[in-house]
Structures are given as structure tokens and as C-alpha cells.
Image (cartoon, helix red, strand yellow):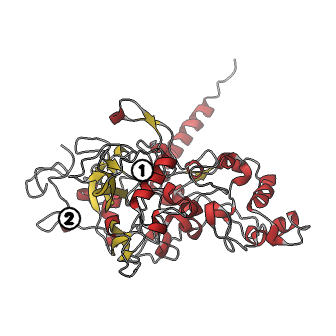
């Protein structure tokens, strides 16, 4: 009869007693959500393209004869999918996916620079010659998107990747006299400067449109933006990019945005990171940006008001107050945001032909959300107010053709500018016009301050608090009436 190896069972038991406490007591690794650096994409090692590009054009006797399409053709030899990937993005299409319009009985439409208006320069269609300098394609044509933009060779690789020696000219084409081979030799991943060529100058100049995006972010201090200044973040660290699809959508050009496509603070930061329970109670109702972006346009001023009705006068031009071709402006620095409930989408976006009440301000966009929306938080916005033209016969906003030999900026004839738009855009003009006030909201997400500069309690609560509590749906200041700060 064999003796059963009970000693083995005993040894296992002893080891279990010894090892289990070690496993239990060993410090657990922090979840990735508690390590903000775990959310930052790794930057691939850049391959110097200087010799690669030179080799592709070694037989060219005059580099000034090389076209943008020649450069793109060379790029596609090594990156065959790049153009087709890019052409699927809104950077190329300049419009959203079609959506059903609730206020138009189920009609479908798209939104974007290609076909809609704002309350800055009003319409990219009105000045395609210059506006298309911020499109990643060549060979636009007056009056619409050119058919040849369906050609992958018209994708402009240098727009985002050339680090020096490149600029745009008319209709999206390279500026005259450039050595595009030399520019192509500098290609690399996009930097703040390359992204900023368009995004810092949106609306017609540095800092005009957004307020939280301007040229001061090319080399910012940490007190201007803690991510870009202290940690030298690139735009693509937050706007993570896959197959040229850049995460983060401008809500003004969309009605509904898939949360998976949007940039959020929780890509890197946990929501449960405040040691003070009083602050933690705010997280369900208050966006991170509300406390951590106390103001925008900290160094460079941003435009907050634009009056087109005063244009056309010979009273002397000044970039910050008046231009004959555009009218009167108000610029401000250190701008306090406007606060609204926001769930990441829009409840309304003005579309060409929508009726207006000229006795009331017209909202170009309306952030979606209210105090009863579980997905909405109090969020900071830049509010831009304008006075822009409308048709007094049809009672809708007009989009003039401003540029070109017959445009408004040539003859300062509004009637002619609206007739041209009728031909090119199909928006009927009754023959009479006036000017009406419009509002447009832009979410504030950049110029995040160091935590030491975050808003304190008295910034929002108390007699001089910045919040309009009743407009937000509260009976009053939650501290004063003794209620909780979270939603009803």
C-alpha cells in the first residue's frame, strides 16, 4: 500500500499562508485613469525626409517648376492611403454628415464652411479666393467646390506637415515662387504652429474667432496654458489622430457629435481626483473647463463684436476698431466666458434660409442642455455678437459675395453682393436688406490654467459671483438658498 503524499498538501498550505498576505498587501498599481500621462499618445520617431524627398526629385533641373500635385504624388508613393483617408474627413469636405433637421419637418442637410454662414466673415463662399488658403486641398474654383478636388493628387500634404518654406496663395494653391521641394524636405508631424496657421487665424485674423486659440500658444508660458506651456503638449496629444481622422469636432459645424469623436479631459484625468469633497460635488454639474479656464484671450485680444452695417465708409482703417471692407469691431483681452448648460451637442444651428425675427437677436447656434439634462454641465463659451445683413422681404440672413471683381469689397454695393450670392448659392434676394443682431457661441477648451489659478468659491458664489444662476435654472445662488449645487 502506497503512502499518500500528504506532505505535498501540507507544503502547499504553508506556502499559501505565506504568499497570500504578500499578494494582498502588495501595493496595487494605480489605474491608468489616475495617471494622466498614461493617456498621452506616444510620439513616433520622426524619419528625416530631407534625403528621401531630394531623391524623388533628383532629375528636376528647376525646383520652382514642381507643383503641389507633384509633391503629393511623391508622398503617395510611400503613404498610399494618406490621401483617401484625408478625403473622408471634415478637414477635406468642410461639412458634416447629413442630419435630419427637427425644425424643417425631417428635411436633411449638412453643416460646414462649405455651405453655411457664421457671424464673422459670414460665409467662406463669399471669399473663396482667400478662405480656401485654410483648406488642405488645391485648385478650388469660384462658386463652389471644384470637381477636381475629388482627385487625390489635389490633397495638400504640405499644409499640415511642412515645417518651413510653405504658404498658401489663391484658391488653396501654393503661394507663387515657392521652392516646394525644399518645403517638402522639412515635413514632420504637425506642431502647434502648423495647426495654428488656420486655427489661430480663423475668422479673418489672429485670435478673432475662438478667444482661446491664438498665436500666443505657439510658445506659451505655463500660466497661459499649463499643458502647452509647462509640458510642451502638441495639439495631437489631445486631438488624437488615426488615419488622418482628428479627434475633436467644432460643435458650431455639427448638431450632434459622437462622444467617441470628441476630446475630453477624462482622456487623461480621472473625474474623481479632488481631495476636497466640496469640489468633488461640483463635478457632476460643472465642466472642468469652467473652473480651470477663468478667462480667455490672456495675451492677444479677441473679437467680441462685429458691426457690418458701418462698412464702406472712408473714415480710416484700424485693425482693431474699423476696416472699410468689414465695418466696426470691438476687441477685448482677459475675457470672462459666458456660461451655459452644455451636453456636447447643439439644440439649434442656423441654416441658410431659416426665418428670423429681426426685432430679436438671431442665434447662429444654441448649445444643447439644461439643468434637467443628466449629460449636461455648466460650460464656458465665448459669445460673439454681430450685426449682419438680412433680407427684409424674406426675413432670413443673407450671405454676400465679398471678394472678386464684382464683390462688395470692390464696389461696396450690398445689392450687387446679394444678387451674386443668389446666382452662386441659390439664396433668393428680394431686393431689400437691413441689418440685425446675431449671437454665436464658441466652446472654450484651451488656455487651461495651472490648478493654482483655478476659480475659487467666491468667483461664482456670493454677491459678485460670475454665474447667472436664474438663467441656469436655479432659484438663485445655491449657497444663499441652502440647496445642493448638483442638479434638481
Dot 2: element: loop
Q: Between residues 431 and 203, which one lies in front from this camera angle?
A: 431
Q: Between residues 418 and 126, which one lies in front from this camera angle?
A: 418
> Which of the 4 image quadrants contains residue 103?
top left
Q: Is residue 291 left or right of residue 457?
A: right
Relative to 155, residue 233 above or below: below
Residues marked 1 and 2 touching at CB (< 8 Å): no
Judged from this view, the residue extending furthest toward the left is 481
Quarter of the figure that contains the C terminus? top left
Q: Which mark is residue 420?
A: none
Relative to 67, residue 224 above or below: below
Dot 1: element: helix
- Residue hosting label 1: 251
Q: Is residue 292 left or right of residue 406?
A: left
The local crowd at label 2, few if under 14, some if 14 to 19, many if 20 or more residues have their Cα within 10 Å, is: some
Judged from this view, the residue extending furthest toward the top is 1
Q: Position of residue 331 (x, y in %)?
A: 34, 74
Residue at horizontal 39 percent and vertical 67 percent from the top: 211
Q: Position of residue 346 (x, y in %)?
A: 36, 45
The local crowd at label 1, few if under 14, some if 14 to 19, many if 20 or more residues have their Cα within 10 Å, is: many
Examine the rendering and report whether any part of residue 269 can be seen. no
Q: Position of residue 3 (x, y in %)?
A: 66, 24
> Which of the 4 image quadrants contains residue 452?
bottom left
Q: Mark 1 and mark 2: span between their CA atoms?
A: 24 Å
Which label lies toward us, 1 or 2? Answer: 1
Q: Is residue 227 left or right of residue 138?
A: left
- Residue hosting label 2: 466
Residue at horizontal 52 percent and vertical 60 percent from the top: 127
Examine the rendering and report whether any part of residue 8 can be seen. yes
Residue at horizontal 39 percent and vertical 29 percent from the top: 106
Relative to 103, residue 323 above or below: below
Amino acid at each position: 500500500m502506497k503512502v499518500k503524499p500528504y506532505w505535498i498538501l501540507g507544503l502547499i498550505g504553508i506556502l499559501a499562508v505565506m504568499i497570500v498576505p504578500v499578494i494582498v498587501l502588495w501595493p496595487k498599481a494605480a489605474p491608468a485613469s489616475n495617471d494622466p500621462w498614461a493617456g498621452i499618445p506616444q510620439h513616433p520617431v520622426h524619419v528625416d525626409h530631407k534625403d528621401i524627398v531630394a531623391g524623388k526629385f533628383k532629375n528636376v533641373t528647376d525646383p520652382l517648376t514642381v507643383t503641389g500635385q507633384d509633391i503629393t504624388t511623391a508622398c503617395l508613393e510611400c503613404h498610399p492611403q494618406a490621401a483617401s483617408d484625408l478625403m473622408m474627413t471634415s478637414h477635406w469636405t468642410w461639412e458634416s454628415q447629413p442630419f435630419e433637421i427637427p425644425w424643417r419637418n425631417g428635411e436633411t442637410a449638412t453643416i460646414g464652411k462649405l455651405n453655411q454662414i457664421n457671424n464673422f466673415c459670414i460665409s467662406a463662399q463669399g471669399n473663396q479666393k482667400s478662405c480656401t488658403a485654410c483648406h488642405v486641398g488645391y485648385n478650388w474654383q469660384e462658386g463652389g467646390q471644384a470637381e477636381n478636388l475629388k482627385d487625390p493628387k489635389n490633397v495638400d500634404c504640405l499644409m499640415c506637415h511642412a515645417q518651413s518654406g510653405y504658404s498658401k496663395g489663391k484658391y488653396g494653391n501654393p503661394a507663387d515662387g515657392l521652392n516646394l521641394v525644399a518645403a517638402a524636405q522639412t515635413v514632420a508631424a504637425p506642431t502647434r504652429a502648423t495647426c495654428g496657421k488656420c486655427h489661430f487665424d480663423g475668422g479673418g485674423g489672429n485670435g478673432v474667432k475662438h478667444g482661446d486659440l491664438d498665436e500666443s500658444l505657439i510658445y506659451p508660458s505655463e500660466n497661459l496654458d499649463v499643458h502647452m506651456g509647462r509640458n510642451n503638449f502638441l495639439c495631437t496629444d489631445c486631438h488624437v489622430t488615426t488615419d488622418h481622422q482628428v479627434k475633436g469636432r467644432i460643435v458650431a459645424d455639427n448638431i450632434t457629435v459622437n462622444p467617441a469623436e470628441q476630446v475630453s479631459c477624462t482622456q487623461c484625468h480621472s473625474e474623481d481626483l479632488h481631495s476636497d469633497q466640496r469640489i468633488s460635488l461640483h463635478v457632476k454639474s460643472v465642466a472642468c473647463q469652467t473652473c480651470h479656464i477663468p478667462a480667455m484671450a490672456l495675451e492677444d485680444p479677441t473679437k467680441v463684436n462685429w458691426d457690418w452695417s458701418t462698412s464702406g465708409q472712408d473714415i480710416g482703417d484700424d485693425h482693431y476698431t474699423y476696416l472699410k471692407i468689414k465695418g466696426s469691431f470691438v476687441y477685448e483681452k482677459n475675457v470672462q466666458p459666458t456660461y451655459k448648460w452644455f451636453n456636447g451637442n447643439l439644440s439649434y444651428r442656423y441654416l441658410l434660409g431659416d426665418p428670423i425675427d429681426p426685432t430679436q437677436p438671431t442665434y447662429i447656434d444654441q448649445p444643447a442642455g439644461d439643468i434637467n439634462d443628466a449629460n449636461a454641465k455648466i460650460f464656458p463659451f465665448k459669445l460673439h455678437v454681430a450685426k449682419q445683413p438680412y433680407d427684409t422681404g424674406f426675413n432670413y440672413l443673407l450671405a454676400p459675395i465679398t471678394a472678386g471683381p464684382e464683390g462688395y469689397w470692390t464696389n461696396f454695393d450690398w445689392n450687387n453682393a446679394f444678387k451674386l450670392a443668389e446666382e452662386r448659392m441659390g439664396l433668393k434676394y428680394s431686393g431689400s436688406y437691413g441689418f440685425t443682431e446675431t449671437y454665436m457661441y464658441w466652446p472654450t477648451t484651451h488656455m487651461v490654467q495651472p490648478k493654482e489659478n483655478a476659480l475659487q468659491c467666491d468667483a461664482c458664489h456670493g454677491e459678485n459671483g460670475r454665474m447667472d444662476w436664474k438663467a441656469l435654472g436655479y432659484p438663485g445662488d445655491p449657497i444663499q438658498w441652502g440647496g445642493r449645487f448638483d442638479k434638481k
